[in-house]
Image: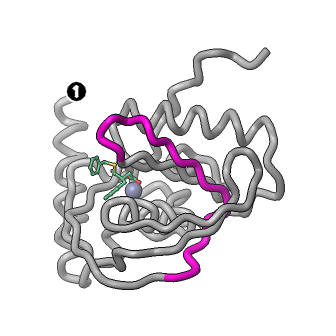
Amino acid sequence: MPNAQPNLLDLVLYPDPGLREVCKPVSAMNDQVDRLIDEMFYTMYDAPGIGLAAPQVAVQQRVIVVDVSEGKDQPLALINPKIIQQAGSITWEEGCLSLPGIYAKITRPNHILVEGMNREGKQIQIEASDLLAVCIQHEIDHLNGVLFVDHLSNLKRSRALQQYRKLQLQEENEEK
Ligand code: K2U
Ligand code: ZN
C-alpha cells in the first residue's frame, strides 16, 4: 500500500554540481518513478512553483513536472521529454527554485511541440505556447544541466550570480 502522503523533497540550490549534470533517461515507467512524480508535484506546489525538474530534488533522471494553471489543477508530468518543433519568440522574466531571489528576462521560442512519456507510460506529444512553453523549456534545460542564467550575456550572468551570492550570504548571516 503506497504511503498516502508524498514526502516534501529538499530543493537543490546553486552551485550544487548536480544541477550541471546531464540526466539519464528513464528506461521504463515503474513505481519508483511514479512515487518520484508525486513527490515532485507536492514539492513544486509547496514551493510554490509552476515547474520542477528531477535534478532540483537530487534525482539525476529525465523527469519534469509542470502546472501553469491558475487553479493548480492541470498537473503535467513528462518523462524523457524532447522538443521536436519550435517557433516564435517570447521574453519572460524567469526565476528558478534553485536560484531563489534572482530574476532575469529570458527570450525563448513561444510555440513548441514536445514529445515524451506520460506517467501512465504512454508516449505523448504536447503543443505548448507562452508560459507553458517557457516553463517546459526551463525544465528541460535542467535535465541538460542548463540554468536560466546561462541564456544571459556574460556580463548579465555574472551580475545575477553576484547578486545571488550576496543574497545567500545575507541568508547565512541572518541564520546565525
Ligand atoms: O524550475 C524551476 O526552478 C521552477 C521555475 C519554473 C519557471 C521559471 C521561469 C518561468 C516559468 C517557469 C519557477 O521557479 S516556478 C516559480 C514561479 C512561480 C510563478 C511564476 C513564475 C515562476
Ligand atoms: Zn529552475
Q: Considering the image in quadrants, where does the N terminus appear? A: top right
Residue 144 located left or right of residue 35: left
Residue 133 located left or right of residue 81: left
Q: Which residues are magenta?
A: 69-85
Report x, y in % for residue 22.
62, 68
The amino acid pointed to by label 1 is Lys
Q: Residue at x 24, y 84 (%)?
A: 153
**Residue 21 lies in the magenta-colored region:** no
Report x, y in % for residue 138.
41, 64
Q: Quadrant of residue 176?
A: top left
Q: Residue at x 73, y 45 (%)?
A: 120
Report x, y in % for residue 39.
57, 32
User: Considering the numbered disc 1 on the image, is that residue within a helix, a strand or a loop?
Assistant: loop
Figure check: 18 above or below 41: below
**Residue 84 lies in the magenta-colored region:** yes
Q: Which residue is mark 1?
A: 176
- Viewer-nearest residue: 131 or 100: 131
Q: How many marks?
A: 1
